[in-house]
DNA sequence: CGTAAGATGAAG
DNA sequence: TTCATCTTACGG
């Protein structure tokens, strides 16, 4: 997928509208990516800002490498590595609009409120049963995968804002979401 | 080594 | 607004 080799900000924007799909023994779940954030090499909020380490190594992988990390001791977030190998940048998937497997998502999330299924990075990971074992896999493989939107998303449907939940680099406009979408995360 | 802060979520 | 919960990165 050529898209992922582009610069990280472009990838973050163009990933909007793609469908993320995960199938396991419980069934299939999928959702449209409606919110993303970019993390760049020269960005203090980026896990790969200082140097490569055991934890952030997937960010330095080939474009499409999956980076799953634990945050606040109890939640996990998914990222897709962008750009060329050895460049520590990635896009955080922050929210999905649920499509397939909504009943399964409800069970996993312990709620019947569809709006609360995937409206945050930790929520969608739980709803889609994404796990730490997927760290360093590739989005180009057959397990967790993405497919392009049927109709390309027009530029004027994409809103750009500052990122959520960070203190460093808080003024950088690296968060993107689909205009008017009901499934994006809250501050 | 010790420890503070962290790309969050749910409840009060 | 608070707390749950724990790994990582950095300072001593």
Image (spheres, coloured by chain):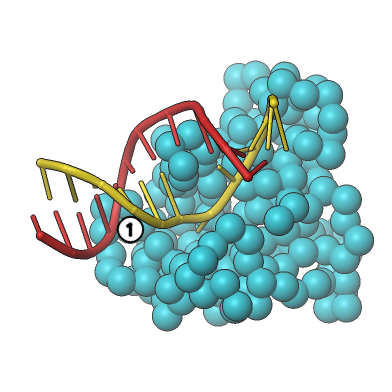
Chain colours: A cyan, B yellow, C red
Q: Residue at x 44, y 67 (%)?
A: A46
Residue A80 placement, left or right of A127: left
Give how far across and how far down residue A170 sits, in percent. Answer: 57, 72
Residue A73 placement, left or right of A125: left
Give how far across and how far down residue A81 sits, in percent. Answer: 48, 62
Q: Residue at x 77, y 24 (%)?
A: A111
Q: Can residue A186 be seen at all in this image of the molecule? A: yes
Which of A26 and A156 lies nearest the eye of the viewer? A156
Q: Can residue A20 be seen at all in this image of the molecule? A: no
Which subunit holds the residue at mark 1?
Answer: A
Q: Residue at x 84, y 39 (%)?
A: A115
Task: Decide: is B6 above or below A104.
Answer: below
Q: Badge 1 local density, few (<14 within 10 Å), some, or many (20+)?
A: many
| Quadrant where the image shows the C terminus of chain A | bottom right
Task: From the image, tell me which residue sits under label 1.
Answer: A57
Residue A182 placement, left or right of A116: right
Which of A147 and C1 lies nearest the eye of the viewer? C1
Name the secondary structure under disc 1. helix
Task: Decide: is A119 above or below A166.
Answer: above
Which of A161 and A58 lies nearest the eye of the viewer? A161
């Amino acid at each position: 997928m050529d898209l992922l080799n582009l610069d990280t900000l472009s990838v973050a924007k163009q990933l909007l509208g793609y469908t993320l799909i995960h199938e396991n023994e419980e069934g299939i779940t999928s959702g449209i990516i409606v919110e993303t954030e970019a993390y760049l090499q020269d960005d203090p909020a980026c896990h790969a800002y200082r140097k490569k380490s055991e934890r952030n190594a997937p960010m330095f992988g080939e474009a499409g490498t999956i980076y799953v990390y634990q945050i606040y001791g109890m939640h996990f977030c998914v990222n897709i590595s962008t750009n060329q190998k050895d460049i520590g940048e990635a896009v955080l998937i922050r929210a999905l609009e649920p499509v397939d497997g909504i009943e399964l998502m409800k069970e996993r999330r312990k709620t019947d409120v569809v709006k609360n299924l995937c409206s945050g990075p930790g929520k969608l990971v739980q709803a889609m049963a994404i796990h730490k074992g997927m760290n360093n896999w590739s989005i180009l493989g057959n397990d967790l995968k993405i497919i392009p939107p049927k109709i390309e998303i027009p530029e004027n449907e994409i809103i750009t804002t500052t990122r959520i939940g960070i203190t460093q680099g808080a003024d950088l406009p690296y968060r993107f979401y689909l205009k008017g979408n009901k499934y994006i995360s809250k501050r």
